[in-house]
Amino acid sequence: MTLPDTAAHPAGADRTFQVDLRGLVDLLSHHLYSSPRVYLRELMQNAVDALTARRGLEPAAAVDAFGIRLYADGSVVRVEDDGVGLTEADVHAFLATIGRSSKRAERIAEQRGDFIGQFGIGLLSCFLVADEIHVLSRSARTPDAPAVEWRGRGDGSYTVRTLPASAHPRPGTTVTLTPRADAGEWTRPAQTHALARYFGSLLRHPVTFDDGTGGPGVSVNPEPAPWARTYPTPGARSRALAAYGEEVFGFTPLDTIELDLPAVGLKGIACVLPEAVPAGRRHGHRVHVKGMLLSEQAEEILPEWAFFVRCVIDAESLRPTASRESLYEDDTLAAVRDALAERLRAWIARAAASDPDLLARFLQAHHLAVKSLAVHDDEMLRMLLPWLPFETTDGHTTLDEFARTHRTVLVTSSVEEFRQVAAIASAAGLGVVNGGYTYDRELVHRLPEIRPHVSVADLDPATLTAHLDPVDRETELAAAAYLAVARDALAVFDCDVALRTFQPASAPALLVDSREARHERTRSRLAREQEGGLWGDILGALRQEAPRAQLILNQLNPLVRTAVTIDEPELARTSAEALYGQAVMLSRRPLRPAESSLINRSFLDLLAHALRKDS
């Protein structure tokens, strides 16, 4: 931008900005458009808008009367359309004014929805690949209108002149670019054809491409969108839509859901992914607006829970952003997102009602997505909760199956807690569900809403230990000395020790602890360390004691029966530490540094004791 001459502009007079066009083009290339390839989309888009306006002038014309012709031979790229064209006044008003729409200002408000482009800067994208843009146009509004030529250059200069009508015999516009040497990647014939197919394969107007070799032009969009075609049978239609989804996305859909929202002129398909995807990973969807490809990464078209599908849609009423590479977040988009979500819910409901095999395959791959939906959707909860798989003490099964044998369902708060208790709870006849995975605990607690005869409760240490049988008094007294040594050895881990009998007998010990209890012990210890002194002692005495872990030794286990008879203090201590270490590892929770050190030390001490005994 340059400053105007102050002598020509008295103080207080209005002034205009002088635009550095090269700087503006650099801004577009780095911050608005994702790639120079968009130049062809912008030219095709302007052509489509011109054809739409021409159709408004001549609504009775045949469907294929007006079209778009592309030409690229390596030296030039040309886009020609049979659209409404421009008059000389239009050229001066629009092509020479950056930021104004190239559609007639007096009609744009009422026809805004008929055009794809709405920001009037699309033509500037051509400067991403060329230093000069040549436009030759003739208006269809005036039968004897002359042709108008406009040449714009990257330095910001331009020329306009009128030519005889014979210079452009038919109404419409031709835009010609002479690509720069560094733009060959985007303007070579094969690449230009590929880009035309990429952006315009679903356009409703005929589009042809000529590579300058003398052969006939080839159609860019030889067939309408697959959902707009006629098929002999419903099965043939389903197969064709699935094949199109596989062609676009590269996977064979588990199923294909047809999408149709007449209120916004939206049609398309949703392809159900055949395999699970990580929770929360949102795939981009392929969105066309009036046939022109807008984006392959439009995440915003579906809600977050719908990450089990990828969509191809073509819509009339969705509004593109300034770059025309994503969708503008407005009330229309929100309504479309809600309506598409309802279509996905309806598909799940149909599968549940009429195709249990499809539903089973779907849930096997995407149960996490469905659980996310069921948490927030009561209808889906009632419909699908009995079908959803959970990890339980009876193996991986549905809640319906599990509830048939367990009227009281216990649920853990973490995967680690489930790992600790699964084998012992199963042997004791307790029905426990692993609630540590995303959504599982919340969903299990809602089971009584669907199956009123079932009760659900959180599993706590007291519930489990209540199902472990106590040992007789003589056995307890005989083991008292060992238990005292074990409690002393494990006091550093805030762990008590008890002797019980439980199945399976192969389990020597059970560590009963919870993440919340460990956090509370850590918090209390840090609080004591920070308070210190007299006040720390007083507050420590008043504070409720944090819950302790409990190592429960199994009297039915031969190793434990031998251990409790050890009368050598050091060996008794080492064996108790080893039993604790083994129980911690079986719980599969992360080891603290002190626990790792204890496990290593107890193993080496036991090994040393065995070697001394043998020698």
Image: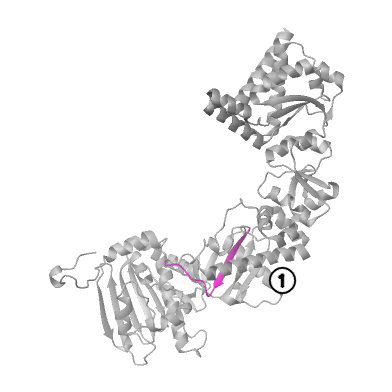
In this rendering, position of residue 244 left or right of residue 30 = right
Q: Quadrant of residue 523?
A: top right
Pinpoint residue 65: horizontal percent, then vertical percent. 48, 86
In this rendering, position of residue 20 left or right of residue 126 = left
Q: Nearer the viewer, residue 365 or 410?
A: 410
Using the image, determine if residue 204 lies above or below residue 472.
below
- What segment is highlighted magenta in the picture? 308-322
Quickly name the residue at label 1. 235
> Furthest residue to the top?
615
Residue ID at (68%, 69%): 238
Residue ID at (81%, 24%): 557
Using the image, determine if residue 583 lies above or below residue 172.
above
Q: Quadrant of residue 228?
A: bottom right
Question: Is residue 269 in view from this perspective?
Answer: no
Q: Nearer the viewer, residue 592 or 129?
A: 592
Using the image, determine if residue 492 lies above or below residue 64.
above
Pinpoint residue 512: horizontal percent, then vertical percent. 72, 32
Is residue 433 located in the magenta-colored stretch of the structure?
A: no
Residue ID at (58%, 69%): 336
Identify residue type, mark 1: Gly
> Furthest residue to the bottom?
144
State the SS at label 1: helix
Q: Quadrant of residue 497?
A: top right
Pinpoint residue 80: horizontal percent, then vertical percent. 40, 78
Q: Nearer the viewer, residue 365 or 397?
A: 397
Q: How many marks?
A: 1
In this rendering, position of residue 206 left or right of residue 501 = left
Is residue 321 located in the magenta-colored stretch of the structure?
A: yes
Question: Is residue 500 in view from this perspective?
Answer: yes
Colour basis: one colour
Pinpoint residue 293: horizontal percent, then vertical percent. 50, 68
